[in-house]
Amino acid sequence: MTHHEHTHHTPEPQARTPWYRTWTGLAGLGAAALAAVYLSLDHVDHVLDALPLLVLLLCPLMHLFMHGGHGGSGKDGKGAGGEG
């Protein structure tokens, strides 16, 4: 008779879907895109007046979206003692 080692693995929790990948987020981004097209076609002067402010607003937005892939937990997936 052979010896079978049975280990029970608990499933890892599912990562939460970012808001911009949900249906509500996509609808909001679509509405924002339509608003941007409308403003760029009918209100060019207002958009150009606000352009410096929009460039400054890009800084916090880039931090929100571009730093999302870091994980933030500081764990490398290995258990105690370096066993993975």
Image: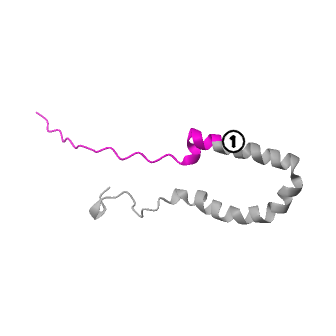
Q: Is residue 13 magenta?
A: yes
Q: Residue, x 70% and y 42% (percent of image)?
A: 31
The quarter of the rendered structure image containing the N terminus is top left
In the picture, measured across the screen, residue 49 lies left or right of residue 59, that is right
What is the magenta segment's predominant secondary structure?
A: loop
In the image, is residue 50 part of the stretch drawn in magenta? no
Q: Please identify the quadrant where the C terminus is shown.
A: bottom left
Which one is in front, 5 or 36? 36
Residue furthest toward the top? 1
Residue at the image point whose x is 69% and y is 41% from the top: 30
In the rendered structure, the answer to whether residue 50 lies left or right of residue 67 reads right
Q: Position of residue 19 (x, y in %)?
A: 55, 47
- Residue sitting at 80 percent across and 61 percent down? 51
Q: Where residue 43 sits in the image (x, y, percent)? A: 86, 51
Q: Position of residue 22 (x, y in %)?
A: 55, 41
The image quarter in which residue 7 lies: top left
Magenta region: which residues?
A: 1-27
- Mark 1 = which residue? 30
Using residue 70 as the reference point, say whether residue 76 is left or right of it: left
